[in-house]
Amino acid sequence: MTIFHAAYIAALIVEAIIRIPYNQRRKQIRVSVNRLTSGDSALLGLLFLGMFLLPVVLIFTPWLAFANYTLPDWAGWLGVVLMVASVLVFWRAHLDLGRNWTPTLQILDQQTLVETGLYHWIRHPMYAAQWLWVLAQPLLLQNWLAGVVGALVFVPLYLYRVAHEERMMVDQFGETYRAYMGRTGRVLPKLGVRSGNLG
């Protein structure tokens, strides 16, 4: 295992630990809207394959070595920086959402619209964290399968989920969410918008 492989495994472990208390809390709250579809479940399964299963196979077995490539050391260290940024955004997004977090297209009972912390600037910090992850992955896992497939499966998930998620939020929060969309970017802050109160 290289130091870059170790960094990838460490990030997987840290994100799992971050999510544990939020997942336990979520299971105790009634779901009021559920728009999970078979397509959504299939894309999540592909994401598991590309961002967990193939990387674990690469790191702990020789089976994918035929697809390795080599990058200079600085590329691997850039991957470490991007992965640390990904985990930090992931952690902060969970902290900002609190009891409102769900892993799928659901709205929980008494869910509120969060507009503070990272959500003051962007509507989808979780996806921003995922974008940082898929940029880091081929730099840390220098393999055409384990390194690149994660990004290939994330792009369709992102395009599908964001559109459906925003439609669900408009249905739930109406003009309040439309105004929020006008002030914020999806995964990057919208230029020219005044900061106001971060909350």
Image (tube, rainbow, N blue to C red):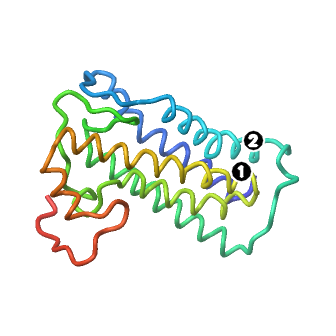
* Dots 1, 2 in contact, CB < 8 A: yes
Q: Give, as a three-letter code, the residue at label 2.
A: Val
Quadrant for the C terminus in the image: bottom left
Report whether 73 appears left or right of 182. Answer: right
Point out the tag, 1 or 2, that comes first from the N-terminus. 2
**Whole-percent x, y for residue 94 in the image:** 33, 45
Q: Residue at x 48, y 54 (%)?
A: 130
Residue beneath disc 2: 57
Q: Secondary structure at mark 1?
A: loop
Residue beneath disc 1: 146
Mark 2 neighbour density, 10 Å: few (under 14) some (14–19) many (20 or more): some
Given residues 81 and 177, the one toward you in this image is 177
Q: Secondary structure at mark 2?
A: helix
**Which of the 4 image quadrants contains residue 171?**
top left
**Which of the 4 image quadrants contains residue 61?**
top right
Report whether 176 appears left or right of 101. Answer: left
Report whether 197 appears left or right of 97. Answer: left
Given residues 47 and 70, the one toward you in this image is 47
- Given the current orientation, which residue lies at the most extreme bottom position? 192
